[in-house]
Amino acid sequence: MDLRIDSSTGASGDVHFVSTDTVNWVILRSDDGVTLIDGGYPGHAEAVLESLRRVGGAPEEIRAALLTHAHVDHLGGLVRLRQRYRFEVYAGADEVAHARREYLEQATAASLAPIAWRPRVLRWLGQIIPLGALDKTGLDDATEFPDLAALPGAPVAVPAPGHTRGHTAFLVADGQALVSGDALISAHPTTTPPGPQCLSPVFTHDPDRNAESLEALATTDARLLLPGHGPRWAGTMRNAVNQALSRR
């Protein structure tokens, strides 16, 4: 599996943005250990471990994993890792029940049917189904965010509901980078061209609320976007949001 890792160092530790052809995750590493943000599909569990090794870490260093949201392409790898390693998994207050699979709020075969015939979508489905895209397993013990300042990397939660009802973005690198999850992305295998954008309404629980949430992201001082899909993007978050909204 092709892993691309972009790293930076700041006062609160190292930030490693790990991107694949289908989804991304983030490793925050300091002297206190590792915080993961998201974990890919179930089939990405070994890739998460490999990315940890490449940045000089180890799974035993993981103190916690944070979810931007509980879709299978962000939660699934963490479910697999929790079968072998012990660490806490946290989500926003309105996303915990989703992570526990008390309900499921993601695209289904029926909702994808209107676009499934498109060549890009067919290729994407061919990529993600072997990675476990149909897996509905959750984490029964996922809990609400604690004091994030105490975690390695000291991430700051920025509520960004819409893509799911409890979606959360995170400021990292002392506020200079924004981990935007799926509220704001820079590319997706089902769309073209690349650049700051919102995911298709097919994949989003409440597109209008997601657009409203982008305003909170636009007011941050971050100059680097670390999205859930697509490459990292440099520029102000106001410019990123304006571009995304213009493409809706």
Image (cartoon, rainbow, N blue to C red):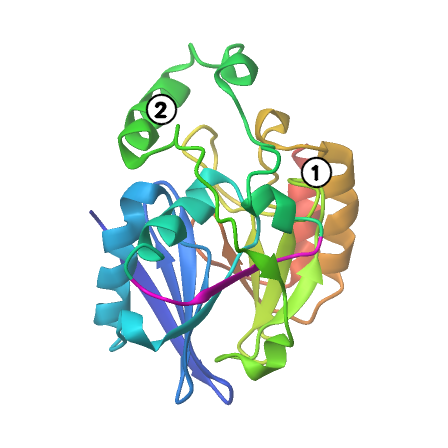
**In the shown orientation, is residue 9 left or right of residue 224?**
left
Give, as a single range, the part of the protein colored magenta: 85-93
Is residue 88 within the magenta segment?
A: yes
In this view, the residue in front, 82 or 68, is 82
**Dot in front, 2 or 1:** 2
Q: Which badge, 2 or 1, is on the more N-terminal residue? A: 2
Q: In the picture provided, is 220 more to the left or to the right than 88?
A: right
The answer to whether residue 3 is visible is no
Residue 99 position within the rendered picture, expressed as x and y whole percent measured from the top left: 55, 46
Q: Which residue is drawn at 61% across and 81% down?
A: 149
When the figure is inspected, residue 140 is found, relative to residue 57, above or below; the finding is above
Q: Position of residue 110 (x, y in %)?
A: 53, 13
Examine the image and state in which quarter residue 51 appears. bottom left
User: Is disc 2 in contact with disc 1, using a CB cutoff of under 8 Å?
Assistant: no
Which part of the image, by quadrant, shows the C terminus? top right
Tag of residue 38: none
Determine whether the residue tagged by mark 1 lies in a helix, strand or loop.
Answer: helix
In the drawing, what numbered circle is on residue 246? 1
* x and y, in percent, of residue 86 in the image: 37, 66
Residue 127 rendering spot, x and y as whole percentages: 29, 30
Please say whether residue 7 is one of the residues in the magenta stretch.
no
Q: Residue at x 51, y 46 (%)?
A: 186
Q: Nearer the viewer, residue 18 or 84?
A: 84
**What is the three-letter code of the residue carrying label 2?**
Leu
Say which residue label 2 marks: 125
Residues at marks 2 and 1, CA–CA distance in whole angstroms: 27 Å
The residue that appears at 48% across and 80% down in the rendered structure is 152
Q: What residue type is labelled 1?
A: Ser
From what the image shows, is residue 224 above or below residue 142? below
Q: Up-down: is 123 above or below 174?
A: above
